Image (cartoon, coloured by chain):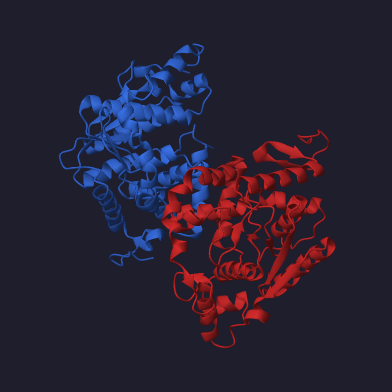
Chain colours: A blue, B red
Amino acid sequence: MKCTVCRGPAVIDVRRHNSAFCPDHFVKHCQDQVRKAIHEHHMIEPADRVLVAVSGGKDSLALWDLLAGLDVTADGLYLGLGIGDYSDESVQHARAYARAHDRALHEVDLGADLGFTIPGAAEATHRSPCGACGLSKRHLFNRFAVDRGYDVVATGHNLDDEAAVLLGNVLRWDVGYLGRQHPVLPASEGFARKVKPLVRLGEREMAAYCVMRGIDYQVEECPMAVGNRHLGYKEALNAIEDRSPGTKAAFVYGFLERGHHRFAEDVASERSDLAPCTSCGAPTPDGVCAFCKLRDRIERAPSDQGTS
Amino acid sequence: MKCTVCRGPAVIDVRRHNSAFCPDHFVKHCQDQVRKAIHEHHMIEPADRVLVAVSGGKDSLALWDLLAGLDVTADGLYLGLGIGDYSDESVQHARAYARAHDRALHEVDLGADLGFTIPGAAEATHRSPCGACGLSKRHLFNRFAVDRGYDVVATGHNLDDEAAVLLGNVLRWDVGYLGRQHPVLPASEGFARKVKPLVRLGEREMAAYCVMRGIDYQVEECPMAVGNRHLGYKEALNAIEDRSPGTKAAFVYGFLERGHHRFAEDVASERSDLAPCTSCGAPTPDGVCAFCKLRDRIERAPSDQGTS
């Protein structure tokens, strides 16, 4: 296997591009794809202050590293979810990367700063931990960005993530989620811009990028996500991709080109109907925002559950 | 396992309905679902002359049988595709059903009547046999219906088929196909109405229906379809359905309720732009219709291929 660019020995093939790369040209391939995504969707302007949502996994550390390679200086924010050893190890990877590359890493800890953990929230609400986790992340990353004057929150969602979320949204024809699914959510009152610069790169490429760049990341998947529906969608798409390389990319990019606008109108008016949460001030359509409702439910649950 | 209706011994469960049925109530379940589909989508009116596309497989024979159970008298049309033993056996099942139930079965044979077979077409065009097969079926079933004064062509596409086709269409965001995917295509100049009364019933239910009704069908799948993309989509959906029963039904019905109209406008004008094929008279946007182009390509191919 030879590098498609320099004909030197290749270490990885990217079937959907019908290409193979040596380490140097693979890193360049990743940078090119991120540059293209940023440019195509106007994700980041030169003067923007960027906050990267850092989990300690391959995607967020690769994203942080790739942004630096494109001369985008970004600070990191790590959110401690209180998921036992998994969280304990994840934060070490985030800190190690920040230290080695001299980056600013902020930390917010659900347990210490907000009085609950994701396992505790799942138990108290009798609902999926992934729901409480996603809600908490969206709320707290945005709040931190708005409070500290960051223009942009960049997350490490890759092509596999976006394809799996899109598959779930079309399987349910959830027109609201379809209207909101986009690599860029523009800023508005109370919201920083949200961007997904890895939308053109797959999971396997992100793992390979970290290996080639010597980035030590949390390899273990979140133990609370094992067996969830999202991973089932990923497996189904992997089986299809394996027979027809490029299916996921065509699915996600095709949606952005020919599908998304058909659903966007339904949700365009949503943000104008928001008012500050009566509890925390975050924009919400419902008086009290979903995050404050979650915290309230946790507080009302039997006292042994909230922080277990 | 007890029948959800009568509490007698059940012989089949239908997980997406959270139900199980004895043989009698299973047959009634199938009839109810077909009645609902016909009613919901205004598929068949009492005075309509109906032609069933009969392949000899479980779906088309079950459809023919179910329509009779709902007092819809339909004639059958079997299309001989020239696929070796598979075709030889299929036609026997179609004839046996017609004979046993005293139904009129018309037959058209690609080889004898049109001078080519599906394997020959695939070889001559260097394209997928499934493409030539679908094209030939659509063209010839419609032509037969129009020529003989049938109002409606009913096909045995079931919920699994529709879900797999829909998945393929959204994976490519093929907005033309999405606009045309519907359980009813209305009649227009040169086109009989096309209806899919089995859209609310799965593949497994159709096989069980045939067993319970003592209908002997061609069990073997078409040997030319083995490994095709459509079957890959079915497998992917089966894996998801297995974890979340009801996914396929929600996917297809959700599309019809909340998705289809967003794509229908793009294709609404298509049929008004058609003119008779200069060769066969079928409505086409292109001067010569796709079926006549296919026949032309086959005729121009080296002479040992057309009917092999």
Q: Which quadrant is home to the N terminus of chain A?
A: bottom left
The residue sitting at 65% across, 49% down in the picture is B38
In the image, residue A278 sits, relative to residue B254, either above or below, namely: above
Front one among B8 and B143 = B143
The residue sitting at 32% across, 31% down in the picture is A271
Quadrant in which residue B175 is drawn: bottom left
Q: Is B11 positioned to the left or the right of B49 in the image?
A: right
Q: Is B260 positioned to the left or the right of B193 in the image?
A: left
Front one among B61 and A82 = B61
Residue A284: x, y in percent?
35, 24
User: In this view, which residue lies farthest toward the bottom?
Assistant: B303
Quadrant in which residue B272 is drawn: bottom left
Residue B56 makes an appearance in the image = no
Residue B297: x, y in percent?
51, 81
In the image, residue A176 sits, relative to residue B191, either above or below, namely: above
Residue A62: x, y in percent?
31, 44
Residue A189 makes an appearance in the image = yes
User: In this view, which residue lies farthest toward the front?
Assistant: B47
